[in-house]
Image (cartoon, rainbow, N blue to C red):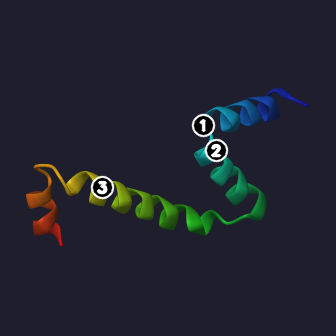
Amino acid sequence: MNFVHRFARNTTARVGIAGGLLTFFWRRKLWWMTPLVAMLLVLGILVIFGQSSAISAFIYTIF
């Protein structure tokens, strides 16, 4: 196995779930789903942090 394959395998093993998800997308050629999943994650993080912080006023003006 060459260096690139070993590097890719070690990198995806270190990042855990995100690496597994990217590996799944890579093998199944589902790159069109990557922006969808990324935006859902960003929206989820925004909702979680926006519930009890000073950011909630800013989020209210966005939506």
What percent of the width, then of the height, locates residue 1?
91, 31
Q: Name the amino acid type tagged 2.
A: Gly
Name the quadrant containing residue 57.
bottom left
Q: Vertical placement of 4 versus 37: above or below? A: above
What percent of the width, then of the height, locates residue 27?
77, 57
**Nearest-to-viewer mark from 3 and 1:** 3
**Secondary structure at numbered mark 3:** helix
Q: CA distance from mark 3 to mark 2?
A: 23 Å
Rendered residue at 47%/58% (across/down): 38
- Labelled disc at residue 48: 3
N-terminal label among 3 and 2: 2
Q: Which residue is mark 1?
A: 15
Q: From this viewpoint, which residue is outermost toward the top?
A: 3
Q: From this viewpoint, which residue is outermost toward the front?
A: 52
Q: Residues within 10 Å of mark 3 (few under 14, many from 20)?
A: few
What percent of the width, then of the height, locates residue 30?
67, 66
**Secondary structure at numbered mark 2:** helix
Callout 1–callout 2 Cβ contact below 8 Å = yes
Q: Left or right: where does residue 51 sit relative to residue 33?
A: left
Q: Which residue is mark 2?
A: 19
**Nearest-to-viewer mark from 3 and 2:** 3
Name the quadrant containing residue 56.
bottom left
